[in-house]
Image (spheres, rainbow, N blue to C red):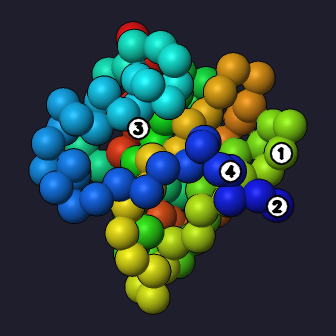
Amino acid sequence: MSNGGDRILQVNEQDIEKMNTLEDLAKNMAGTAVIRDADETIGSNFEKVDESVAAILVRKNSADGAVRIFGREIRNVVTGPQEHGFVLVCVSEGEHCRIFGTPTVRYFRKA
């Protein structure tokens, strides 16, 4: 499994407070216009993420779990009380994402 290189971006606390900056980051990563969901959501174990999602903001310091992207390579973001920070993960065309455990995420959907 890979950490994803340029497909997983560490996001600083100041950017979390500026939702427009987050949308711009997600748009640049995904290569398409995106609209962010109004609220964070708590994922469900083994949940398959809808194909309309182009990027996901993952709160690493949330419940134990993971956000995993399946494609040419597998990218994995681990969450849990011992983790820190936020990451933005891109879900490219032809890839799919699954949630393990119950991490807190915010979806950015294709516009």
Instruction: Look at discs 2 and 3 and give the one toward the viewer.
Output: 2
Numbered disc in front, either 3 or 1: 1
Residue indicated by mark 2? 1
Question: Which callout, 4 or 3, points to the residue nearer the camera?
Answer: 4
* Image position, residue 102 (x, y; %): 50, 66
Q: Which residue is the site of mark 4?
A: 4
Q: Amino acid at mark 2?
A: Met
Q: Which residue is located at x 70 percent, y 46 percent? A: 69
Residues at circles 1 and 4 in contact by the CB criterion of under 8 Å = yes
35 or 38: nearer the eye? 35
Q: Position of residue 99 (x, y in %)?
A: 61, 54
Q: Which mark is residue 73?
A: 1
Disc 1 crowd, CA 10 A, few/some/many (<14, 14-19, 20+): few
Q: Secondary structure at mark 1?
A: loop
User: Could you say which is closer to the camera, residue 19 or residue 99?
Assistant: 19
Label 1 or label 4, whichever comes before in sequence order: 4
The residue at the far front in this view is: 6
